[in-house]
Image (cartoon, helix red, strand yellow):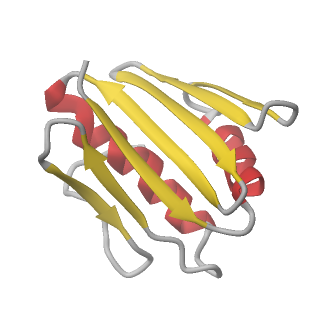
Amino acid sequence: MPRSVARVTTDRPARYAKQLAAHLGRRIEAHWSEETGRGELTFGAGTGTLEAAPDALLLAVEGEADQLAVLEDVVGRHLVRFGTRDELVVEWHRDNGQPGLVHRNDEPGPEGAQG
């Protein structure tokens, strides 16, 4: 299944992962473990993982090729919104070599994306 990953530099990766899982958990199945520093997201169109590294939040999404941008958008857009003060940047890298989405506070997501 196609996959896309992002490494988001931050000194508070666990905080952002927990917040993201809690927020998305209102609409999808989402879990965050303080003990392992890992979380899972289950969307109708695919899955996602969150991992707190010492200096970054590691993100991954997997889904059908035509849904990958939607998954990138939902995860990246929400995370950037939470990290406005820290100016988080989410730059996705797809395993097929195609460029993924890039999320910054000053850029809206693609038209029609939902989250």
Q: Residue furthest right?
A: 35
Is 115 positioned to the left or the right of 107 in the image?
Answer: right
- Figure quadrant of residue 85: bottom right
Question: Residue 43 appears at what percent x and percent y?
Answer: 44, 24
Taking the image as shown, residue 46 lies to the left or right of residue 40, namely left
Q: Is 77 displayed left or right of 102 in the figure?
A: right
Q: Quadrant of the N terminus?
A: top left
Q: Is residue 65 left or right of residue 76?
A: left
Q: Which residue corresponds to the image point at 25% horizontal and 35% vertical from the top-left?
A: 68
Query: Which quarter of the figure has residue 3?
Result: top left
Q: Nearer the viewer, residue 90 or 27?
A: 90
In the image, residue 57 sits, relative to residue 51, either above or below, namely: below
Q: Which residue occupies 28% across, 40% down?
A: 70
**Viewer-proximal residue, 3 or 113?**
3
Determine whether 1 is above or below 84 in the image: above
Q: Position of residue 56 (x, y in %)?
A: 61, 59
- What's the residue at 67%, 50% (across, down)? 53
Image quarter where the C terminus lies is top left
57 vs 70: above or below: below
Instruction: Residue at 33% x, 22% y: name it.
Output: 45
Q: Position of residue 72 (x, y in %)?
A: 34, 45
Q: Residue furthest front?
A: 54
**Which percent across, then down, holds residue 29?**
60, 21
